[in-house]
Amino acid sequence: MAKSWFIKVQENNPQQTLRNLYAQWLKNEQVSALLVPAVSATGVFAPVLFSDPEKVSNISPLLPVMSVNAASIVAEIAAEPATESRLGVVLRPCEMRAVVELIKLQQIARDNLVLIGIDCPGTYKPGSISPELTASSDKLDEWINEFVSNQEQYLKDEHLRSACRLCEFPTPLIADMTIGFLGLNPRKKLILTVYTENGSRLLDGLEIEPTEDTNPERNKYLDMFVRTRQQQCEQKIADFDRVGIGYQNLVRYFAHCLNCHNCMKVCPICYCRECFFDSDVLKREQDDYVRLSRRKGLNRMPAGTLLFHLTRMNHMMTSCVQCGICEDSCPAEIGLSVLFKKVSRNAQAAFDYLSGRSLDEPLPLTTFREDEFREIGEE
């Protein structure tokens, strides 16, 4: 049973309030380290492994910038069970969903991992943030605090990442503890909600105010937010259907693909140690390329780009969390977010599955149910 508490914001500064909270967790040894967002002195946006409370000023807990899906980093750090340390990972909803899928795919060890989810109304690409802003920590903090406070602008902001403007999950679906600010006044209070014993341990020593598990003000805002995002998503998918349905349209859609495989390399769900498309299987000699060219008269180079994308979609669509980091990494700026949103949502719906919804829900392709697909099979 989830339980919630309000945490008072100090000096109207939610950024600093969370810094102090995280530092306290480290000082009290409730966690050994925290994976959190940060901005370096040179203006680089990246998650950091934060373990020294004295360096708390270097982290940015509410930073609305996404340079990588942090689930990939969790998979790198926590591939094997820890025996001496307790790692807290502060993750956005799409990142948390990816971690859940990777745990089920046996790519992340759940042991001694504390899952801390945080509200996310959307994020920006790193390149859209001006260097002048990152040059001053005070200016950056004020910009971040203003962003989380100005909640009526989220659904209108066309500068948010494409995937974020399609996202229907502003709050984590699963966590040990969640940190919430949507539907509240983040200059005054934040809400901590605990779901597990792992999360309860983080409350020790905190001066917090109990609240009802159901918060009408917050719930009303979240209902409106999700409903609006769903409408925006349906419109974007309808726009895609007009240009992307059918083989010839897909060929045109991927026409500018460079075959760089960046989308695969940054995807947290593409976990294979060696990809078929990077293996020797598809390597050809010069004579093979020439024979293929003679058969067709001409052959687009690089070859096999559409096959790569269709195979990748088929491989991971049931676990895709629609984070959109694939589109952000594409040098050809192909609109992968809406395509993967459509494909993965339809595939998961066919199995009555939602990626990252539950650690106990089996992966669709690892189990058999007698009641599946009765309408297209025999009774």
Image (tube, grey):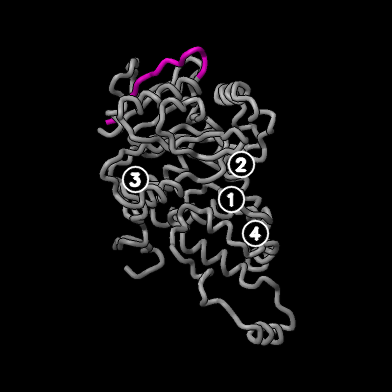
Q: Disc 1 marks which residue?
A: 337
> What residue did someone put label 2 on?
161
Q: Quadrant of the C terminus?
A: bottom left
Pointer 3 and pointer 1: residues touching (CB < 8 Å)? no
Q: Residue at x 62, y 61 (%)?
A: 245
Q: Earlier in the sequence, mark 2 or mark 4?
A: 2
Figure quadrant of residue 272: bottom left
Q: CA distance from mark 4 to mark 3?
A: 32 Å
Establish if 374 lies above or below 51: below
Return the disc, 1 or 2, that comes first in the chain's sequence: 2
Q: Is residue 215 above or below residue 66?
A: above
Q: Position of residue 159 (x, y in %)?
A: 66, 37
Of the two numbered discs 2 and 4 in the rendering, the one whose residue sits closer to the viewer: 2
Amino acid marked by disc 1: Ser
Q: Tell me the element at label 1.
A: helix
Query: Residue at 71% of width from left, 86% of height from top?
Result: 294
Q: What residue would you read off at disc 4? A: 244
Q: Earlier in the sequence, mark 3 or mark 1?
A: 1
Q: CB under 8 Å between callouts 1 and 2?
A: yes
Q: Which residues are magenta?
A: 1-13
Of the image marks 3 and 2, the number of the one nearer the N terminus? 2
Residue type at mark 2: give it.
Answer: Arg
Number of callouts in the render? Answer: 4
Find disc 3 in the rendering and name its residue.
Answer: 358
Q: Please state the horizontal and vertical placement of residue 26, each as a whole percent of the image.
A: 35, 28
The amino acid at mark 4 is: Gly
Q: CA distance from mark 3 to mark 1?
A: 23 Å
